[in-house]
Amino acid sequence: LLLCLIFSVSSAYAIDLSGAKIKGNGCETQLKIQNLKNTYVIPLNIDLKKSNTSALERKTCNLRIPIKLQAHQKLIVSEALQNIDIKSVKGTKIEATLKIAIASQKSKEMSIESESEENKKLSVSGLVTESACGKDAMLTTDLSVFATGPAAVSAKLDALSIEMKIVSCK
């Protein structure tokens, strides 16, 4: 299971991601942010493989990004997309859930489940979340993937794309 976060920044205000942190039993890489022409790529590597001898396998990986805002600014997050390649069989289920939020606000949750070999997408169009005007924000993403059943299965997440910008507010 491989996860890369891609953040598109389309505002006059720069977003500082230097305080970003990852944790979880599925995170297998150090957080190294790449800036590619206002697109931030943040790899989060997770490998979910369930053998036929275990009934359940679960992996999680969480990202926290503190965002500093001026008195006249707010953070807007929109257009989230996650591609998932699933290798499963009937009777053995894989479920993936992604939650995106500003800390202390209700999260936007995307979830899929499958019992076959297929490509799936976790996606949401339009506004995902936004911060309060003039208050620092903590962007959170929580990814959870689990497999249940008798067969050996696996899942691979390609990349999470999130559009993110800082805009003026009153």
Image: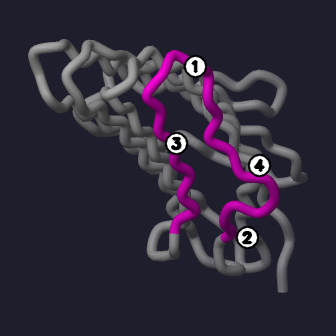
- Residue lying farthest bottom? 170
Of marks 2 and 1, which one's residue comes earlier in the chain? 2
Q: CA distance from mark 2 to mark 3?
A: 30 Å
What residue is pinned by disc 4?
79
Badge number at residue 13: none
Q: Quadrant of the C terminus?
A: bottom right
* Res 47 visible: yes
Q: Identify the amino acid type marked 1.
A: Glu
How is colour applied across the structure in the image? Answer: one colour
Q: CA distance from mark 4 to mark 1?
A: 23 Å
- Residue lying farthest front? 90
Badge number at residue 112: 3
Of marks 1 and 3, which one's residue comes earlier in the chain? 3
Of marks 4 and 1, which one's residue comes earlier in the chain? 4
Residue 123 image offset from top left, x and y in percent: 68, 45
Residue 19 image offset from top left, x and y in percent: 47, 45
> Relative to residue 83, is residue 162 depicted above or below?
below
Q: Secondary structure at mark 4?
A: strand
Question: Do tag 3 and tag 4 residues touch (Cβ < 8 Å)?
Answer: no
**Viewer-nearest of labels 2 and 3?**
3
Dividing the picture into quarters, in which one does residue 49 lie?
top left
